Amino acid sequence: MLKLGLTGGIGAGKSEVSRILSSYGAMLIDSDRIAREVVEPGTPGLAAVVAEFGPEVLTADGTLDRPRLGGIVFSDPERLRALNAIVHPLVRDRSAELEAAAGPDTVVVHDVPLLTENGLAPLYDVVVVVDASPETQLDRLVRLRGMAEDEARARMAAQATRAERLAVADVVIDNDGPLEALEPRVREVWTDLVARAAGS
């Protein structure tokens, strides 16, 4: 089994790369999706979040009010740490559970947006960084996701710098160009990953 950590700045195209890798047969473990699952209604995760932040972080139907919780934690590093202390261990345990089900030659792709920020590179056999220039990222966020430019810049600024991400990369997938240029590069990387998985 080859454990791969996949990351990239917002708007770099990481989701597209993980989609392509999945289509080739990689097992995808998506941290963001798991982070949502572990705080669904009825979970111990949601109970712990409510115990920490109060019932006002719930919507009328008992689901987590993400915008409200985001408003609390993103302006207060202490509260963000408290939230991460609840969610991160749950995500880690669920990821390990999913990974344990993978076959011996499987390439397991952990899609981890904050891999660099949280110092997680040592957990993986290979770290793949999807890279795009800040200009490209900004253009995609504004043009394709409809973000206001100042919001896009703030989101980008809240993440690791491009240099910090590249410093932890074993493999870099350049995604500054058009979508059709991405697939051949990902296929090249995939061929190498399969060989490494078989060798490990």
Image (spheres, helix red, strand yellow):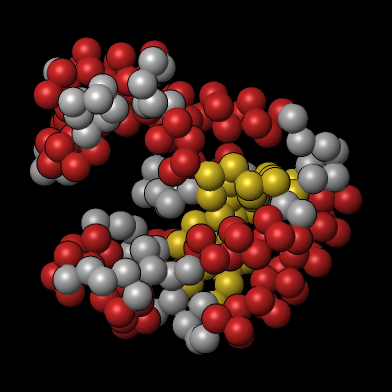
Residue 7 in picture, x, y percent from top left = 49, 57
Residue 169 sits in quarter: bottom right
Residue 144 in picture, x, y percent from top left = 35, 75
Q: Nearer the viewer, residue 28 or 194?
A: 28
Residue 146 sits in quarter: bottom left
Q: Nearer the viewer, residue 80 or 67?
A: 67
Image vertical order of residue 41 relative to residue 147, above or below:
above
Residue 1 in picture, x, y percent from top left = 79, 42
Q: Residue furthest right?
A: 198
Residue for point 58% across, 72% down:
173
In the picture, measured across the screen, residue 152 lies left or right of residue 140, that is: left
In the picture, measured across the screen, residue 145 lies left or right of residue 12, that is: left
Q: Residue furthest front?
A: 61
Q: Nearer the viewer, residue 166 or 90?
A: 90
In the picture, measured across the screen, residue 152 lies left or right of residue 90, that is: left
The answer, for residue 170, to whether it is visible in the render is no
Residue 150 in picture, x, y percent from top left = 14, 70
Residue for point 37% across, 26% down:
39
Residue for point 71% across, 68% down:
189
Residue for point 75% across, 74% down:
188
Residue 106 sits in quarter: top right
Image label count: 0
Q: Nearer the viewer, residue 61 or 182?
A: 61
Image vertical order of residue 38 relative to residue 1, above or below:
above
The answer, for residue 145, to whether it is visible in the render is yes
Image vertical order of residue 164 relative to residue 52, above or below:
below
